Amino acid sequence: MQLTGKGYFLWRIQQCENGNADRIADAASDAGLSHMIIKIADGGFPYNVDKEKNVDFVPDVIRALRARNISVWGWHYVYGNYPRQEADIAVKRINQLKVDGYVINAEGEYKIPGRSTNARIFMSKVRDNFPNLPIALSSFRYPNTHREFPWHAFVEHCDLVMPQVYWMKSHGDAGQQLMRCVKEYKALFPQVTIFPTGPVFKEWGWMPYKEEVDEFLKVAKDMGLPGVNFYSFDQGRLPLLKDLWQSVKEFQWGDQSHPKGLAEQLIDALNTREINSLLDLYEDQSYHIRPGSVIKGREAIKKWLEKFINDIAPLGKFIINSLKSFDNSISFSWQLQHANTTVLLYGKDVLMLHNNKINQHYSYFSEDPIVEID
């Protein structure tokens, strides 16, 4: 999955929009974000969970963001003392949450002599478990001034770097700092995509000016970078930083309407109850398969869809909970929600594709929650 456009790092879910997943997702969508990067682990422990109440706050936010066609990555701060344990929790959280990508946040703790070995232990285990998952490193803006950091041990297993281009303690040179950052990373790692992170926060009395955030965005786009992140969503939503939030929101990074895949188009058509829009997604001789039933051809599928939206699901809104895309198939789970609270149906579908149309549609739904088994 290629990452493009604007995104934010989200640190503490419960301090964003009072922890309301839909309000978080609405704000992200309103700002034209293509992705969100949520903290899912810290060291050897899961993050954004309440251990006493046994509540994980991340899945609801992922569901809400994906329902608005925003991809979700997870980030993990690593310390390097116990690389195997940190890798274990990374593997566990990625499997639990089915994130679209994973970001390693490694900083000063990894400048201790000998940490290159620990970095390789950590990275090898994560990459061995997820050979195709997009992985990024979030670290210092200028690698040349942090030579003690084991850059190669991390980056040789990464698809992207997300340098933290924070021009703290200075003003007026945001664009220059970004250009220097990109130049240094390209010299070291010409094959790796650079996706910089800018500051939307206040720390030790310093905060960026609105004009500097504007400059950072413009220079990044002019340099042909695929997109940018900002840190952090938590502070960006505070009244004190509303001008910075507005700068990011107003900046147009290409088409912010994000083209939708077949699963999203199918859900949109179900929500409008438009039969013709639904049928346009299927090949002429496609199959629709449910437990105990196999039908073939658009006419037969049309009759089933009419029955489904008129008799089985005449009310409520369809929402995608999770989605995985492969070369020629899409697997997704959904729910039919009424009045924002009551769930009427739970579903799990697989679409087999041919010529960008649905060739085979496997569908299962129930009034009871579906236990997903990988």
Image (cartoon, rainbow, N blue to C red):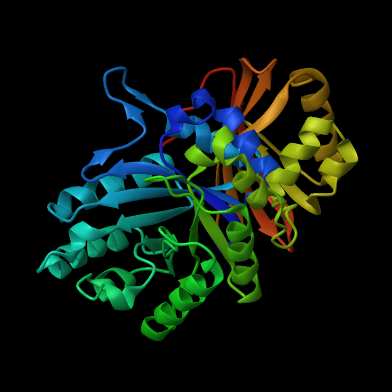
Q: Is residue 151 above or below residue 265?
A: below
**Percent position of residue 150, x then y:** 22, 71
Q: Quadrant of residue 268?
A: top right
**Percent position of residue 71, x then y:** 56, 49
Q: In this view, does 129 lie to the left or right of 218?
A: left
Q: In this view, does 74 lie above or below 26?
A: below
Q: In this view, does 77 lie to the left or right of 141?
A: left
The C terminus: image quadrant = top left
Q: Pick the residue in front: 206 or 125.
A: 206
Residue at the outermost right position: 276
Q: Residue at x 72, y 51 (%)?
A: 250
**Percent position of residue 16, x then y:** 50, 31
Q: Which residue is drawn at 29% across and 75% down?
A: 145
**Percent position of residue 277, x then y:** 86, 43
Q: Pick the residue in front: 374 or 12.
A: 12
Judge whether residue 157 can be spotted in this image.
yes
Q: Is residue 270 above or below residue 207?
A: above
The N terminus: image quadrant = bottom right
Q: Residue at x 51, y 22 (%)?
A: 369
Q: Residue at x 40, y 54 (%)?
A: 102
Q: In this view, does 374 lie to the left or right of 61?
A: left
Q: Pick the residue in front: 12 or 74.
A: 12
Q: Pick the residue in front: 322 or 309.
A: 322
